[in-house]
Amino acid sequence: MNRWLVWFVVTSALAVATPAAPASRLETKVRSLLTDAARRDSIGGPDQHRFAIADLEQAVHLVPDDPALLDALGRAYLAADYRHALEHHAGVFYESEWHLRGLGDANAMANWALVAPSDLRGTALTLQAGVKVPTGDTQAEEINSLFAVAIPHLDPEMRRHFAEIDPLLPPEVAEQLDLLDPSTRDELVRRYWSRNNPDPAADQNLALLEYRARLAHALLLLGDPWNAHWGRRTELYARYGRHVQIADPTESGHNEMPRLDWGEGAEKPTPRALASLGQNTTEGGMGVFAPLPPTAHRRDLVAALARFEGERGSRLLAQLETAGTPSESLWATCVVVDTSEHEVTRAAATLAPSPCAPDAQRTAEFAFDLPPGPYRVAFSLRDAGNGRGVLRLDRELAAPARGLGMSDVALCCGPLDAGRGSVRVHLDPQAAVAGDDPLNVYFEVYHLQAASDGGTRFEYEYDVRPAGPDRRPWWSRLPGADPSRLSYRSTQEGVGSTRRQFVHVPTGPLPEGRYRISVVVRDLLAGTKVERSTEFDKRAAASAE
């Protein structure tokens, strides 16, 4: 008779029936099923084992959340090599130390579990049987710590698979990576996970946790998932989890691991197919990972970036915006990462009513003094109800000009706050105007040449035209017949080498569409010029309710 079944029946009987209260009808039925399963298992033989499994399945159906019942059924499936049933079962299966070869001493491993619902709720090592997967920061931190403890105790070959990213790379790139010295290879792997981190503001990299969970799940289901028989199936699962399935006309539904038998291959999903999953896609479509934890509900957000010159070089202004009412509690973190995938700086803020739409939008502003170079700016938004939003923008900051210089052309909303020599600009992340509303534009001009009396003189000119190719018939493009083109020129005089300019651009005549506004500044004393541009949308006026 199988020891695991005898042990399970004894411990379950202790748990179900207590002297303090008589057993309920449900408890009596479950105990009867367990007793019958043990009796049939003791008789032995394939038919009796199948009947024993049927008893356990019925017990799990009656008490679906009992981790001990799930453990017994999972062990029974594996003992009978019912791996297909194990994959399709809707519950949660896990195993302890006997299946996780090399994970450490038996006393510690008696508490380990592998949890396998789906997606980011994939598999993760946990200390208590039945503990749920990472649904928040605390659980993600715990699971990351458990991986950190467990992985070093794996045998060297299994440990190598948890450390490498070969399945997520094109074969030729993976081969080159394997030829590098360990320190260089480890650094490139670190950068890979940093680039694909869905939320750099979080303490744990959820993409890395999801990848390791997939490998742990494969280890549970297949025992030796990297052998010649299962290797390709494991690679496919490591890349896409259960989001991507192998088409099989003889079978319907999802497998916990996509079915890929020995000798079979699978074509890489198309970019369109991967985009439809709503997941973050890695370089070359070689993998997908969840942008948010599984229990979080998504909040949409938009952001705008604008470069100015500051006292210490370039100054990056970042504005985040999301739909929300004044009564909501919202907070955000902005993280700046450089090309070496190291965090340069971060800041946190509580969102306030947006000057763009105080009753419907909430906003947060961040400002960073940064040296020239390319950066990735990541935003992380949270609310009190487990709502989350993430957004990443790339931006390269040019070095301050030696001669005539100019900031970005910033689209703004609300009044311009100016006083005591400083200006506060509220960027418009929506980058849009509606109906007859004007387009509010702000820019700064630097290093104007001064005359002998200290005065400066410059000219600015803006030009608005459709952002895309002009596909109108030729007669619509004749001079004076183009309502989608605006231009204006103005000469300004002042004192000082820096000028802050705020411009209202009338957009009433413009048809709906996407436009580019270009601003040219000419220093009339130095004979130099500089140009910047940005794009915006013209929309129909909001209907009155």
Image: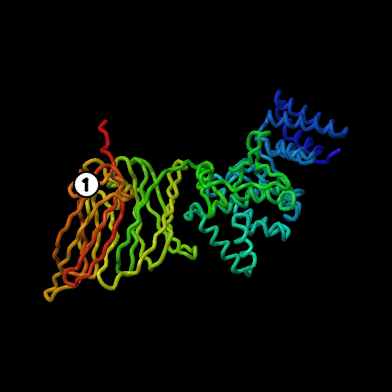
Please state, as top left, top right, bottom left or bottom right, where the C terminus lies in the image: top left
Query: Looking at the image, can residue 68 be seen?
Result: no
Q: Residue furthest top?
A: 25
- Left/right of residue 477 with respect to residue 58 in the rendered view: left
- Left/right of residue 6 with respect to residue 57 in the rendered view: right
Q: Residues within 10 Å of mark 1 (few under 14, many from 20)?
A: some
Q: Foreground residue, 339 or 359?
A: 339
- Left/right of residue 487 with respect to residue 151 in the rendered view: left
Residue depicted at x 12% and y 76%: 452
Horizontal and vertical percent position of residue 345:
42, 62
Residue depicted at x 84% and y 39%: 2
Rendered position, 541 above or below 402:
above
Rendered position, 309 above or below 389:
below
Horizontal and vertical percent position of residue 245:
62, 41
Q: Residue furthest left?
A: 453
Residue depicted at x 38% and y 48%: 302
Mark 1 falls on what kind of element?
Answer: loop
Q: Residue furthest front?
A: 474
